[in-house]
Amino acid sequence: MAPHFTPEIQASIDAVRQDVAALHAELVRYGLVVWTGGNVSGRVPGADLFVIKPSGVSYDDLAAGNMILCDLDGTVIPGTPGSDRSPSSDTAAHAYVYRNMPDVGGVVHTHSTYAVAWAARGEEIPCVITAMADEFGGPIPIGPFAIIGDDSIGRGIVETLSGHRSRAVLMQNHGPFTIGTSAKDAVKAAVMVEDVARTVHFAREAGPLIPIPQEAIDRLYDRYQNVYGQSGDERR
Amino acid sequence: MAPHFTPEIQASIDAVRQDVAALHAELVRYGLVVWTGGNVSGRVPGADLFVIKPSGVSYDDLAAGNMILCDLDGTVIPGTPGSDRSPSSDTAAHAYVYRNMPDVGGVVHTHSTYAVAWAARGEEIPCVITAMADEFGGPIPIGPFAIIGDDSIGRGIVETLSGHRSRAVLMQNHGPFTIGTSAKDAVKAAVMVEDVARTVHFAREAGPLIPIPQEAIDRLYDRYQNVYGQSGDERR
Amino acid sequence: MAPHFTPEIQASIDAVRQDVAALHAELVRYGLVVWTGGNVSGRVPGADLFVIKPSGVSYDDLAAGNMILCDLDGTVIPGTPGSDRSPSSDTAAHAYVYRNMPDVGGVVHTHSTYAVAWAARGEEIPCVITAMADEFGGPIPIGPFAIIGDDSIGRGIVETLSGHRSRAVLMQNHGPFTIGTSAKDAVKAAVMVEDVARTVHFAREAGPLIPIPQEAIDRLYDRYQNVYGQSGDERR
Amino acid sequence: MAPHFTPEIQASIDAVRQDVAALHAELVRYGLVVWTGGNVSGRVPGADLFVIKPSGVSYDDLAAGNMILCDLDGTVIPGTPGSDRSPSSDTAAHAYVYRNMPDVGGVVHTHSTYAVAWAARGEEIPCVITAMADEFGGPIPIGPFAIIGDDSIGRGIVETLSGHRSRAVLMQNHGPFTIGTSAKDAVKAAVMVEDVARTVHFAREAGPLIPIPQEAIDRLYDRYQNVYGQSGDERR
C-alpha cells in the first residue's frame, strides 16, 4: 500500500532524497563523523514529510533510494523506497524540530570532535572570530542534557535555538545539532560549528582571547546574512 | 601436507580472509595506524582457527590470500595460503583471547595516537559523552604493563575485559586492544575508542567535565546494544 | 560591451585565470579552508587588473572561466567571463593591496585554524624555527581589528606588511592574509603560515621555547630568498 | 661528458632513483611535509654516490629521472639525468652523513609538526611507549643548533647518532633528520618519529607519564630489531 503523491510532491521527495544522500559525503569530507555516526535530514517542501538516513548503515551505501521518508511524527511512510529499514535513531529529534520550527528545512547531527569537547564541559563557544560572527551572529549555545527515548532531545534543541541567531546547539555531553533553511544549509552549519569549535579551542588554550565588540558582531552578522554569496542562491 | 577442511569450514575461512584483509583498510581510513603497524584478526566460525595479518607487511599488500590461518595456540597452519610468512608479532595475544573468551569473534590492535596517550599515563578514559555510553557502557579501562614474549599481554586483555562492558582496553604504555562479535565489530570498537580518546582529551584539556549519571549511562548502553541499527545486522 | 584587450594582455589574463582557479585546490589540499571560505587572487602583469574567486561558490566549481576580472578599485569588468557573478566579499581588501603595493602579484586570505587561533589572541607568532626564519625572516605580525565594509582591512594589511619581511599578517580576530610575487607565491605563504602557526602552537604548549639569535635569522632569511630553489623559478 | 658506470652500478643507480622518487610520496601520505619541503636520499650500493631530490620542486613532479646523483662531497655528477637542476639545499648534510657513517644507506629530513615542536624547545622525547622502545630503543635525542652554510648540520647529526640506538635526531629549532639501512628504512624512521612525537606530546599534556623500565626497553628493542617482520626483508 504505497502512498500516492502528486507529481510535484513526488519530484520534491526525489530531489530531497538526492540531496540528503549526497550531503552525507560532506560530513565525511570534513571529518565530522566516524563509522555510521551522524545524520542529515531534509524537509520535503510543500508536504508534512522529511527524508532521513537509515540507522547504522555505512556511509559507502548511502544512495538516494536508501534514504527513508517519514512524516512529521517520525513515522516511516510504508511502501516507499528504504521503508524496510529503520530510520536514524535520532529521527524523533529531527521530527520534533520540523513540527515545531516551520522555517527549518534541514537538520544535521554529528559527534564532531571539538564541538563534542565543548559539550562535555557544558560550555558555550564564545564569539571571538569574525567568521563565527558572520555565520552564527554570536556564541554557540549549550542545550540541556537529554537522552534518547522521548522528545527531550528535540525539545532541548527547539527551546535553545528558538529566537537565537545561532543555527547550532551543543547538546550537553552529547554533541551538535544544526538547523538550516535546507539540508545543505544545515550541513554548512555543522561544518562551520566544528571549525569554530576547533579554532576557539586552540586559541583559548594558549592565552586570553580578545572579545569582539557586540556592535561589530551585529554588523558582521547582518552583512553576511544579507549580502554574501551569489544572488539567486539560498540565503546562506 | 595442506590440511583438508570440510567445504563449510573452507567457505568460512575464505570469508574471514576476505573480511580481515578488507578491514585493515578501515584502520588506514580512520588514521589509526602508520606504516605496517596495527593488526586485525577474525575467528573462523565453527572451527578452532583464526585469520590474522602477516607481520611487517605494507597495508597496500593486504590481499585475502596474504592473510595467515592459525590455530588457537597461534601456530600457523602449514600448507595454507600465506603460511610461508610470519604472522603478526601480536599473534600470541590474539590467540590467548580466542582461547579464553569464546564469544569473541574478532580482535584488533593499534597504536592510535590518543588512545596510546591515555595508556602512557595509565589513565582510564572517563565516560562523559553519550556516544561512549552507547558504545562502551562506561569508562575505557587500563590493562597492565606487559611486554611481548609470553602470554602476559593476552592475559592482561582477558583479565581486564572479562565481565567488563567495554570492548576496548588500553594496555599501559602500549595501546588499545579491542574485541568484538566479529572482526568488523572489533574494528568498529578500535575506531570508536580512538574517537572518544581524542574527544575526551580535548574536552578535559580546557576545563572540568560534566559527569553523566550512572543511570543515564545504563539506559544509553542498554538501548544501543539492543535497538540501534538494522534488524538482521550483527548486534552492534 | 565586453572590453577589448591587446593579445598580450588577454593572454596574461587567461594565464592568471588558470593559475588562480588551480591554486584554490592547494588551499583544499593543505586543509586551509572549509566550505566556500578562503580566496586567492592574482594581478594581471602589465595591466591594472586582477583575477579573483567568485563569492560563496563551491571549491568543486572553480574553473578558470568562473574567476572574475576586476580593476584595481575592485570593480568587476563587465562583459568578461564570470562577470555575472559577485566577486569574493574580500575583493575590496585585495584591491587595496594591489593599488598600494605595486610589487605584490598575488593575495590570499584563509581562516586556517592555527593562524586564526593566534589572531584571536592578537599575538604575533615568534620566530623559533628555522623554516620560519627562511620563509618569513622573523615573527608573523598581527594587523588591526577591522571589519568588512570600507578600506580598513586593506589598509591594515598594507600598513602592517609595508617594510616588513613577513609576507603574512594575522588580522586580529579574523585570520591570515598573505602576499607574494605571484598568486602561487602568496598561496605558498598561506600554506607556510598555517604550518608555522600550528608547529609553534604545539611547541609552546609544552614548555619554554629556545629563541633563534637574530643574526642567525638574518642569515637564514638572506640565503633562502637568494639561493633556494631552481634558477629560473620565481624567487621563492 | 656523461660518466660511464659499470652495468651493475648503473642498475643500482636506477633502482635507487626509483626508490627515492617513490618514497617522497610516503612523506606526503603521512603528512610530514608541506609544499616542497622535506627530502629523501639513498646511497648507491657499491659506489661512492647517493641520489637526492632536487631543490624546491613540487612533490607532484618527483619522477625518478628528476632525482639528482651526487658524490659523497655532495657534488652533482655532471651529464646524468637531473644534473641540470640544483639538488636539495640539505645535500651537504646528507653527504656528510654518508661520508662519516658507512652503514647508513638512507637519510631523510622533514619539518614534521610535532617533531619540530620538541626541537623548538630543545627537548628530547622520552621513551614512554612500547612502539618507541621497539623502533628507537630509547629517547629521541636533540642535536645542536646549526644552520646551513657549512658542515655543522651534518656534523651535528653524526655526533648525536653515532653509537646511539635512535635512527632519528631532532636538530634544535630545526627538525628531524633520520637515517636507516636504506632510503626506505630512513623514511620509516621519519614516519615513526613524528608518530611518537605527536603521541608523547598529547600524553604528557594531560598529566604525568609512566616511565618504562630500562630493562623492558632493552628487551623490546632487541626483539624488534631481530625478530619482527618477514625473514628476507631488510632488518627493520
Image (spheres, coloured by chain):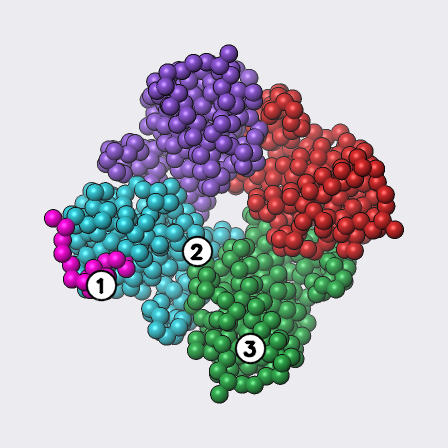
Chain colours: A red, B green, C purple, D cyan
**Residue D9's x, y, as percent?**
19, 62
Q: Please report, as a chain letter, where disc 3 is located.
A: B
Amino acid type shown at disc 3: Ala
Q: Secondary structure at mark 3?
A: helix
Q: Residue at x 60, y 31 (%)?
A: A132
Residue B21 shows in the view: yes
Q: Please report, as a chain letter, where disc 1 is located.
A: D
Left or right, residue C54 beside residue C132: right
Q: Extreme top residue here? A: C1
Amino acid type shown at disc 2: Asp
Instruction: Relative to B8, say whether C167 is above or below.
Output: above
The range drawn in magenta is D1-16
Q: Secondary structure at mark 1?
A: loop
Q: Please report, as a chain letter, where disc 2 is located.
A: D
Whether labels 3 and 1 share one chain? no
Left or right, residue A167 beside residue C63: right
Amino acid type shown at disc 1: Pro
Q: Residue B95: which disc? A: 3
Left or right, residue A60 beside residue D64: right
Q: Measure the alpha-carbon separation of dots 2 and 1.
A: 29 Å
| Residue carrying label 1 | D45
Instruction: Relative to A226, say whether A1 is above or below.
Output: below
Task: Answer whether residue B59 is magenta in the image.
Answer: no
